[in-house]
Image (tube, rainbow, N blue to C red):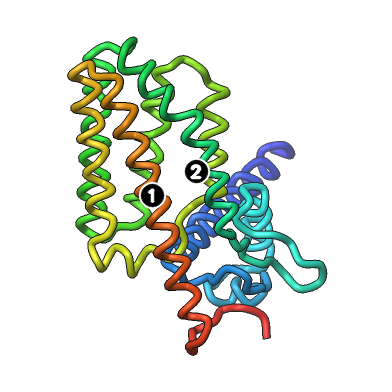
Amino acid sequence: MSELKPRTLISVQKHLRDQVANALRAALIAGDLKPGVIYSAPTLAAEYGVSATPVREAMLDLAREGLVEAVRNKGFRVTELSERDLDEYTEIRSLIEIPTVGRVTRSASREELEALRPVAEDIVAAARAGDLIGYLESDRRFHLGLLGLAGNSRLVETVADLRKRSRLYGLTELAEAGALVASAQEHTALLDLMLAGDSAAAEEHMRHHLAHVRTLWAARNQEKAGERTSSVRKLGTR
């Protein structure tokens, strides 16, 4: 009994931390948490109706992902991505993902590729419904699942980390404008090219897809610059 109780408390605390972390990620994606703004754990805790401890722990998780950075005695600042950051992330992903897609096209079985079709369809469905969390989660599953067919777990881990660090912020307006649907549909088109065994076309399509994602980043950054001149709701420190 003396060992069971602490383990139960730790489990509950970890579960709450994960819930808060997911809520904070959703706020980042929706644009409710603004890049460059400092947010305190107590202020965010009041917003979410929890104590400051799980918020602080969740923010530390996000800091390890590169989404926020700790500011001594103040809280956490949402990481800003420069145009150079985005270009560099895109370049690294291109160097890894484009040739890997070609290799997987030549080596994967039809059954392995077809298993990804429901995930590709989930991406499109989420984009059409404006389900931003579902969109990003399905997109993550598709890309990492596809790369996983190459049989290199370190490669998958590297791309997963890059995706976390270069995550799109403030997708709400882009989703409402229908900008995400076209990008979502590129996943099923890629799968069709791979199933046809056309590795060169699949590589070119992946190159186009990553460039498309980069233009979404650029569009979001331009919008963000405009928002700085207007009044916005802030959840941050006072």
Point out the image quarter for the C terminus: bottom right
Which residue is pictured at 23% across the width and 53% down the height? 181
Q: Is 131 situated above or below 212?
A: below
Q: Is the residue marked by circle 2 packed among few (<14), some (14-19), or many (20+) residues within 10 Å?
A: many
Q: Residue at x 51, y 86 (%)?
A: 229
Q: Secondary structure at mark 1?
A: helix
Image quarter in which the N terminus is found: top right
> Residue extending furthest right?
72
Q: Residue at x 46, y 15 (%)?
A: 151
Q: Is residue 64 above or below residue 108?
A: below
Depth order, front residue of 85/230: 85
Give the distance between the C-alpha atoms of the residues marked 2 and 1, in whole angstroms: 9 Å
- Displayed quadrant of residue 193: top left
Residue holding disc 2: 90
Q: Residue 236 is drawn in which quadrant?
A: bottom right
Estimate the x, y position of residue 46 in percent, counting from the top left: 58, 77
Q: Is residue 156 left or right of residue 61?
A: left
Q: Secondary structure at mark 2?
A: helix
Is the Cβ of the residue at disc 2 closer than 8 Å to that at disc 1?
yes
Residue 188 is situated, as x and y percent measured from the top left of the image, at: 21, 35
Residue 182 against residue 30 in the figure, above or below: above
Whichever of callouts 2 and 1 sits on the residue coming sooner in the sequence is 2
What residue is disc 1 on? Answer: 213
Amino acid carrying mark 2 in the image = Thr
Using the image as rendered, state which of residue 97 and residue 63 is in the foreground. 97
Name the spot of residue 145 as percent of width and height, x first. 38, 28
In the image, is 138 to the left or to the right of 160? left
- Per the rendering, the mark at residue 175 is none
Q: How many marks?
A: 2
Q: Neighbour class for label 1 at 10 Å: few (<14), some, many (≥20)?
A: some
Q: Amino acid at mark 1?
A: Val
